Amino acid sequence: MRRQVIWAGVFGYLGVNLLMFLRFFFPRALYEPNTVFSIGFPGDFGLGIDQRFLMTNRVWVVREPDRIFVIFARCTHLGCTPEWKPSENKFKCPCHGSGYDSEGVNFEGPAPRPMDRAHIALDATGKIIVDTSRLFVDDPQAGVNHFNDPSAFLSV
Amino acid sequence: MAEENGGNGKRTGLVERVREDAEDIKKLVREKGKEEIDSLKDPEKTQLYRSIFRVKHDETPRSRSLGVLSNVFLHLHPAKVNRDAVKYNYTWGMGGITFYLFIVLTFTGVLLMFYYHPTKVQAFRDILYLENDVPFGKLLRNMHRWAAHLMIIAVWLHMFRVFLTGSYKRPREFNWCVGVLLMVLTMLLSFTGYLLPDDQLGFWAVTVGTNMARATPGLGNEGPFGSLLGMTPYNDVRFALLGGSIVDANALLRAYIWHCIAIPLIASVFMGVHFWRVRKDGGISGPAPVMLESDIKEEKGPRPVIMRPSGMT
């Protein structure tokens, strides 16, 4: 009995230490760009792809005749940032050559699905608030399409 | 092993040899005793030279073996090696070359650490500084880079040779597993070193590599059962590797610490086990034993029985 108690103590101690060791690798505070940010008024965006927030927040703002939506600039293959090529009217990923049309829908290369779209909403002053921690996925293989969900786009 | 083969031969000289050895031992004991008494008589007289520079051994096979066995660095290598085990066309020497490259990488890596800061502001500048201004910096960096490439190649060729010669079989299964772990550690060293120059190549390579970690079953936010177990980009295995959700300053620092301290330490421990295990399992595995004709002619007695440690015939 005494021996079991001692072993339980030893293993318990080591186990708790292991958990502490593992938890140590998950920081509480991050010094990363905020995932929620304002991009201004809907009227600030003309038709087409807007690259203003690519360097700071990794998104393209897309204005179409009837809607505004925000593409999260991460290739769905292995996570590189594609490049907008206006002359070819497509997004091209430099890592493995995935290509997306002007709505971020894949048509060439290894990408398995269109690029994700970020949560978008208007605040009280009428400015657009984007949240890249809430992404909308269109995955034809899994048979899910959230691109027409509310907050995946703004009607204008 | 050679000892086992050698023991079968000439028995005629054995008694004489034992007698000679006994005489030697007697003489040695007498000398030692005298030395001890002398040192007690005169404690001021120390063996200063010998305590620092050690003893020179006589040119006898036994003494030379002792010289090897009593030296911590030389004892890693067996005092006697089977003739078959040193055939380069059989072993390719790849295990030894891998170890040699590891030593080169440790040495050049430590020197590079004198000039490198693992921060976003300075890392790439330090690379340029090493390349252009540090005396022999370019040489050091290229030695580290090329030795790293060669080590990966040597590890794979070593594994290939062990596979082709069937050296993973009994009794070496355990050492094969240790070797596989060492190979994975070598790959991880290579991968973590990739990010350290903080250039475009390394940045995107690590972006791609850590995105694969997203797909880890159970532990990645896009892997099977990942979302069921509550994995998000902010608490999965990729997050732990990067120290964040993007490849940034934390990722650089983590790669640096894994690359320079943690993985080399772990790999060194496993290397110790690996080398010790080679000896335990009967030395480097050799081809099926072959006797030279000249050896056979010398034998006068009954045919020698050749012992193989693994029970191979």
Image (tube, rainbow, N blue to C red):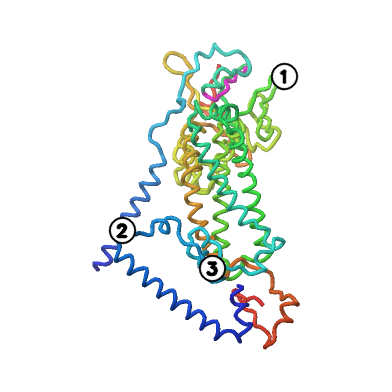
Q: Is residue A107 above or below residue B10?
A: above
Give the residue at the far top of this rendering. A43
Q: What amino acid does circle 1 point to? A: Ser
Mark 2 belongs to chain: B
Magenta stretch, main secondary structure, is: strand
Q: Residue B36: which quarter of the image?
A: bottom left
Respond whether the residues carrying marks 3 and 2 are from the same subunit.
yes
Residue identifier under label 3: B65
Callout 2, which amino acid? Glu
Q: Are marks 3 and 1 in contact (CB under 8 Å)?
A: no
Q: CA distance from mark 3 to mark 2?
A: 33 Å
Q: Locate the N terminus of chain B and report the quarter of the image it occupies.
A: bottom right
Residue carrying label 2: B44
Residue stretch rendered in magenta on the structure: A57-64
Contact (Cβ within 8 Å) of mark 2 with mark 1: no
Q: Disc 1 marks which residue?
A: A87
Instruction: State whether residue B141 is above or below residue B173.
Output: above
Which amino acid type is shown beneath numbered disc 3?
Ser
- Helix, strand, or loop for circle 1? loop
